[in-house]
Image: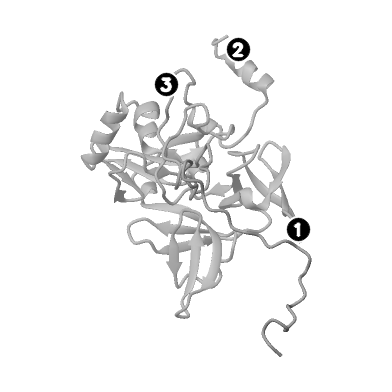
C-alpha cells in the first residue's frame, strides 16, 4: 500500500492546542507577581516597652523601646536583662549607654564570671557581684512574682541552687544532668533525679548536696499565679499525658496547688539552703497589706 492509502491514527476529538507566541507589542511575563508583604528573616531584634514582661516593672510612659535580652541560659520572658538591673533597680546608671560602659569595664560578675554584655539575661538563683561597690545579690521572687535583688553575704555567694530538668547518658556513655540555668553536670551523683535540686559550687561548677523532691520538702514556686510563694510539699497528684499537680502548704497554714514544673526545692523541713527576701514567701491579701500600711502610718 502506498503512503496515501495508509489510515491516519484515530483522533481523540479534542482540537490540538497551539502555543501562542507572545505579542511583540506587550512584554512577555516571565516572573510571578510578588506578594505585597514580606516577612523578615530571623529572630526579632527589638523589644517594645508595652510588650515587655510585667515583672520588669517598666513604666509604659518611659519611652517606646525596652532592652531585649541576649540569648543565654534563661528564657526571654523569664529573665531580666543586666541593663534593667543596673539602671532601674540599683540606680547605678541613668541611661543604657552608662550600663554598657559599666559592663565593658568588667565591673559585673554573674555566677562568678565577668559579663560584658549589658543585655545579658540573668535569671532565678543567679548570683550577681559588683566588686567595686562590694555588693552581692541573688535573684529571687517576691510573693507577687517579681524579681528581687536579695542582698547576700560573701559566704552565701559561693554557691547556688540548680533544679535538675533532665538526666541522660551522652554518646560516649557519660551520664549528664542538665539544670534550669543551662549547666551540663557531667558524672553527677546517681541519686540526682529530675525535679531534684543540687547545690553547685560557683567557683568549680561541681555539685555538692542534693535536695530531694519529696513530701515535706521546702519549695518555692517559680512560675504561675503563685510565683514567689514558699511552703512545704504536701501532695503530688500525677496525671499521665497531662500536667501533674502538687499541693503546697505555707507556714501560715494556707494551701494552694500548682503544676509540678513550677516547683523549685530550696530546702528540707523548714530550713532553706538560701536566705529568703522580705516576707519569706508568705503571700498576704490586699486587706492584710492595707492593715500593715495603716499601722505603719503610711495611709
The picture places residue 91, in percent across and down from the top left corner, at: 34, 25
Q: Disc 1 vs disc 2: which is toward the camera?
A: 1
- Tag 1 residue: 238
Q: Residue at x 42, y 35 (%)?
A: 46
Q: Nearer the N terminus, badge 2 or badge 3?
A: 3
Mark 1 residue crowding within 10 angstroms, few (<14) / some (14–19) / many (20+): few
Residue 258: x %, y % from top left: 70, 45
Q: Is residue 295 above or below residue 91?
A: above
Compared across the picture, whether 164 is left or right of 82 comes to right
Question: Is residue 133 something that shows in the picture?
Answer: no
Answer few, some or many: residues within 10 Å of disc 2's Cα (few below 14, many 20 plus, some between 14 and 19). Answer: few
Is 266 in front, or is 240? 240
Secondary structure, mark 1, is loop
- Give the residue at the far left of this rendering: 105
Q: Secondary structure under badge 3?
A: loop
- Residue corresponding to mark 3: 63
Pointer 1 or 2: first along the chain: 1
Q: Nearer the viewer, mark 1 or mark 3?
A: 3
- Of mark 1 and mark 3, the one earlier in the sequence is 3
Per the image, the residue denoted by label 2 is 294
Q: Is residue 165 left or right of residue 121?
A: right
The quadrant where residue 145 appears = top right
Mark 3 surroundings within 10 Å by alpha-carbon count, few (fewer than 14), some (14 through 19), many (20 or more)? few
Residue at position x 27%, y 35% from top?
100
| Quadrant of the frame with the N terminus | bottom right
Q: Position of residue 52 (x, y in %)?
A: 50, 32
Kindly report the distance in space between the C-alpha atoms of the residues bearing marks 1 and 2: 44 Å
Mark 1 in CB contact with mark 2 (< 8 angstroms): no
**From mark 1 to mark 3, how far is it between C-alphas?**
46 Å
Residue drawn 36% across and 39% down?
A: 119
Q: Percent position (x, y) of residue 14?
A: 75, 63
* Color theme of the render: one colour
Amino acid at each position: 500500500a502506498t503512503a496515501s492509502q495508509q489510515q491516519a491514527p484515530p483522533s481523540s476529538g479534542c482540537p490540538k492546542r497551539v502555543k501562542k507566541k507572545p505579542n511583540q507589542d506587550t512584554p512577555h511575563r516571565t516572573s510571578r507577581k510578588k506578594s505585597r508583604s514580606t516577612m523578615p528573616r530571623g529572630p526579632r531584634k527589638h523589644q517594645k516597652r508595652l510588650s515587655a514582661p510585667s515583672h520588669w516593672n517598666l513604666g509604659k510612659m518611659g519611652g517606646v523601646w525596652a532592652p531585649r535580652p541576649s540569648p543565654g541560659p534563661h528564657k526571654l520572658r523569664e529573665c531580666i536583662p543586666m541593663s534593667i538591673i543596673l539602671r532601674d533597680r540599683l540606680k547605678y546608671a541613668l541611661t543604657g549607654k552608662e550600663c554598657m560602659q559599666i559592663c565593658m569595664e568588667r565591673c559585673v560578675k554573674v555566677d562568678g564570671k565577668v559579663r560584658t554584655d549589658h543585655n545579658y539575661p540573668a535569671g532565678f538563683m543567679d548570683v550577681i557581684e559588683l566588686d567595686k561597690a562590694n555588693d552581692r545579690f541573688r535573684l529571687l521572687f517576691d510573693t507577687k512574682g517579681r524579681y528581687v535583688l536579695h542582698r547576700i553575704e560573701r559566704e552565701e555567694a559561693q554557691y547556688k541552687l540548680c533544679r535538675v530538668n533532665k538526666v541522660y547518658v551522652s554518646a560516649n556513655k557519660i551520664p549528664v544532668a542538665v539544670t534550669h540555668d543551662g549547666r551540663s553536670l557531667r558524672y553527677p551523683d546517681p541519686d540526682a533525679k529530675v525535679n531534684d535540686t543540687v547545690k553547685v559550687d560557683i567557683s568549680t561548677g561541681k555539685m555538692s548536696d542534693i535536695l530531694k523532691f519529696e513530701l515535706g520538702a521546702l519549695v518555692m514556686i517559680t512560675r504561675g499565679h503563685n510565683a514567689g510563694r514558699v511552703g512545704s510539699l504536701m501532695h503530688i497528684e500525677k496525671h499521665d499525658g497531662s500536667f501533674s499537680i502538687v499541693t503546697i502548704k505555707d507556714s501560715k497554714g494556707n494551701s494552694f496547688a500548682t503544676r509540678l514544673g513550677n516547683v523549685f526545692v530550696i530546702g528540707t523541713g523548714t530550713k532553706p539552703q538560701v536566705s529568703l527576701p522580705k516576707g519569706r514567701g508568705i503571700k498576704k491579701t490586699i486587706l492584710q497589706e492595707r492593715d500593715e500600711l495603716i499601722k505603719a502610718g503610711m495611709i
